[in-house]
Amino acid sequence: MKKVRRYEAERRRQGCKRRRAKDRVDKSWRLSGCHLALLLIRDMAVASEGGTEDAKRRGDVFARAFSAHLARLMEEPAAYGKLGLANLLELREECLREFHFFDAYRTIKQRENEASLVVLPDLLMELDGMNEEMRLLTLIEGVLAANIFDWGSRACVDLYHKGTIIEIYRMSRNKMQRPWRASDTKIIF
């Protein structure tokens, strides 16, 4: 019996070590992803302000400040509390606001709104051709696809530079094949 207890205790310790190692890799991946996107975000923020000299100066200061936060988090992951993707994105938005970039995505939103209006009639026709359950599920997937794009999914960003908004929407929907982590759509229907 003692051997079994010792074996189980050792298994728990090994499991904890593996989880901690995986958490370190995940945190490092998130931080390096934010760092890689930093210059792109800076450029978008500057463009949203018309590319003025003042906007360029504020953009450079934002990039240095956010880079310093990322460097601190690499050394001390719990420096600002829990280190998750949502927290990193919120920290980035706070830094943007600190340097008076209140909508770094303004020019992208304008361009995407114009492109969306062009494809909207086709999308509405596609939705009208679906039964009620499929239509609702498709709309939910569309909302989720928009969030994937908003959070800067690497595949979505790459497609954004090569494709159109409708291609991004369809690619995101195709990537989100069910079952989802929480996938009880029967409650909705």
Image (cartoon, rainbow, N blue to C red):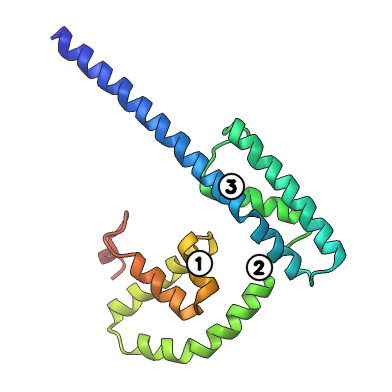
The quadrant of the image that shows the N terminus is top left
Q: Residue furthest left?
A: 1
Q: Nearer the viewer, residue 64 or 1?
A: 64
Q: Earlier in the sequence, mark 3 or mark 2?
A: 3
The residue beneath circle 2 is 105
Q: Nearer the viewer, mark 1 or mark 2?
A: 1
Q: Give SS at disc 1.
A: helix
Q: Tell me the mark number nearer the camera, choosing from 3 and 1.
A: 1
In the image, farthest residue toward the right:
54
**Amino acid residing under circle 1:** Asp
Q: Which residue is mark 1?
A: 158
Q: Residue at x 50, y 80 (%)?
A: 164
Amino acid at dot 3 = Leu
Indicate which disc, 3 or 1, sits on the residue closer to the N terminus: 3
Query: Is residue 141 visible in the rendered structure shown here?
Result: no
Type of amino acid under label 2: Tyr
Residues at marks 3 and 2, CA–CA distance in whole angstroms: 17 Å
Residue 137 left/right relative to 47: left
In the rendered image, residue 61, in percent from the top left (x then y), is placed at: 79, 51
- Looking at the image, residue 173 sits to the left or right of residue 58; the answer is left
